[in-house]
Image: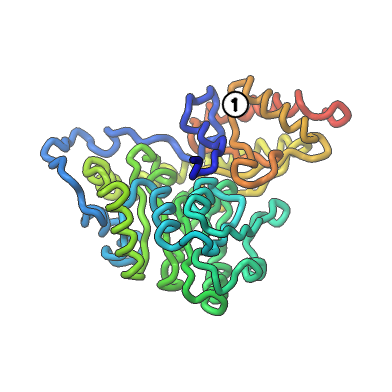
């Protein structure tokens, strides 16, 4: 009966705590940010296009240097991940998933019965993907390789060189396979840092997936997309979408188009907020370096922080989470993502800077109260 594995990350769509550092988004946009007094009263509420609104497809394509006919609009990025798993992987087909990862990306592959090969990235190596390690996970039976850049939960990006070498390995070992690159956080750069180029140009076998949820602050619109230059795959994606949801809501697509029209100033404002959150979090790590260490993210509103083993045994890790929760602060637990529990995903984008400071102070108190007696400072 249970087709999808359960994961406690579902807590993130439950009642919010006082300080939510478990989330991975920036501040939520409001409807007024997109409408500015405009009305959608003339919008027909009939079915939309199975592929997606043509104007929205064109806007998404332009942002990626792709053709509008390469785009399939989906009900959030997760819908795109599921459709790709469903279309590309029959039961028993091999799929490679790189962890730690967004758990629903892995669950989609498990739900369709794919034979999963897991490539684990290391906190101690900064979560950097080594194509040499990927080679060992590939075989002629591989149908899909699922990556994210920047990654969730770490915010670490995969270098273009590593992606290029991965494509070359696929051409050598599994030429019929596709490389899925979840680029949901790609545009969430800090301050004046450059936005990484999309992986799409590397090969027709590369599929880019993203959404409006993370970089743009509009998870409530439930608009995502998959982009592929492979016409046959796109057609199967459209058919699969039609057979699951028929089309996306026309209201959501109309608002998404409004967002794309204002995308530049929206992202510019968020770059500043993300950079402030990043700097505040970096300062917190420095101040508490006796208790924690981290991997600095390349983009996004998230990072991975690890409780130092010398001060937190397994029971100490549990005490830390319980104490932080009692203080109203929630972080995302590493084991949600296939990491060890002492690794925390800390989201610094959703709270205001003042709230972030209060939340981090609550974590500091939890650290000091739960470190082992011999290691307390």
Could you tell me which residue is drawn at 15 percent across and 43 percent down? 46
Where is residue 79 drawn, in percent x and y? Answer: 39, 49
Quarter of the rendering occupied by the C terminus: top right
SS at mark 1 in the image: strand
Q: In which image quadrant can residue 62 be found?
A: bottom left
Residue that extends furthest to the bottom in the rendered view of this protein:
172
Instruction: Please tell me how crowded label 1 is: few (under 14), some (14-19), or many (20+) other residues with Cα within 10 Å.
Output: many
Where is residue 267 drawn, in percent x and y? Answer: 39, 47
- The colour style of the image is rainbow
- Classify residue 308 as left or right of residue 63: right
Residue that extends furthest to the left in the rendered view of this protein:
42
Residue that extends furthest to the top in the rendered view of this protein:
326
Residue that extends furthest to the right in the rendered view of this protein:
374
Q: Is residue 47 above or below residue 321?
A: below
Whether residue 280 appears in this view of the structure is: no
- Classify residue 204 as left or right of residue 248: right
Q: In which image quadrant can residue 22 be found?
A: top right
Where is residue 138 drawn, in percent x and y? Answer: 60, 69
Pick whichever, 223 or 336, lies toward us. 336
Q: Residue tagged by mark 1?
A: 329
Could you tell me which residue is drawn at 33 percent across and 56 percent down? 240
Could you tell me which residue is drawn at 33 percent across and 66 percent down? 66
Could you tell me which residue is drawn at 39 percent across and 40 percent down? 219
- Classify residue 361 as left or right of residue 192: right
Where is residue 101 drawn, in percent x and y? Answer: 57, 50
Whether residue 267 appears in this view of the structure is: yes
Q: Is residue 293 above or below residue 151?
A: above
- Classify residue 198 as left or right of residue 370: left
Pick whichever, 360 or 105, lies toward us. 105
How many numbered marks are there? Answer: 1
Pick whichever, 93 or 101, lies toward us. 93
């Amino acid at each position: 009966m249970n087709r999808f594995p359960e994961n406690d990350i579902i807590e993130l769509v439950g009642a919010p705590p006082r300080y939510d550092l478990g989330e991975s988004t920036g501040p939520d946009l409001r409807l007024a940010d997109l409408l500015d007094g405009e009305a959608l009263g003339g919008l027909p509420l009939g079915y939309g296009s199975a592929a997606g609104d043509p104007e929205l497809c064109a806007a998404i394509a332009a942002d990626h240097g792709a053709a509008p006919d390469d785009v399939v609009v989906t009900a959030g990025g997760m819908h795109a991940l599921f459709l790709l798993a469903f279309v590309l992987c029959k039961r028993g087909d091999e799929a490679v998933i790189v962890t730690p990862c967004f758990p629903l990306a892995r669950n989609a592959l498990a739900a369709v019965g794919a034979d999963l090969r897991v490539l684990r990235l290391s906190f101690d190596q900064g979560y950097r993907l080594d194509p040499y390690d990927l080679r060992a996970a590939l075989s002629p039976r591989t149908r899909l390789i699922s990556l994210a850049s920047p990654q969730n939960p770490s915010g670490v990006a995969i270098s273009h060189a590593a992606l290029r070498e991965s494509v070359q390995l696929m051409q050598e070992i599994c030429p019929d396979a596709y490389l899925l690159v979840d680029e949901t956080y790609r545009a969430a750069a800090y301050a004046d840092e450059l936005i990484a180029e999309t992986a799409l140009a590397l090969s027709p076998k590369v599929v880019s997936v993203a959404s409006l949820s993370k970089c743009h602050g509009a998870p409530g619109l439930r608009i995502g997309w998959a982009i592929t230059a492979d016409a046959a795959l796109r057609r199967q994606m459209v058919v699969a979408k039609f057979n699951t949801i028929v089309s996306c809501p026309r209201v959501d697509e109309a608002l998404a188009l409004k967002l794309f029209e204002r995308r530049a100033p929206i992202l510019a404002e968020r770059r500043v907020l993300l950079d402030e959150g990043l700097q505040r979090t970096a300062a917190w790590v420095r101040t508490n370096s006796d208790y924690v260490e981290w991997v600095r993210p390349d983009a996004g509103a998230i990072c991975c922080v690890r409780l130092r083993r010398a001060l937190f045994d397994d029971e100490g890790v549990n005490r830390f989470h319980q104490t932080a929760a009692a203080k109203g602060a929630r972080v995302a637990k590493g084991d949600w993502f296939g990491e060890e529990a002492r690794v925390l995903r800390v989201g610094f984008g959703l709270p205001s800077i003042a709230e972030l400071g209060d939340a981090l102070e609550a974590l500091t108190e939890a650290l000091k109260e739960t470190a082992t007696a011999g290691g307390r400072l």
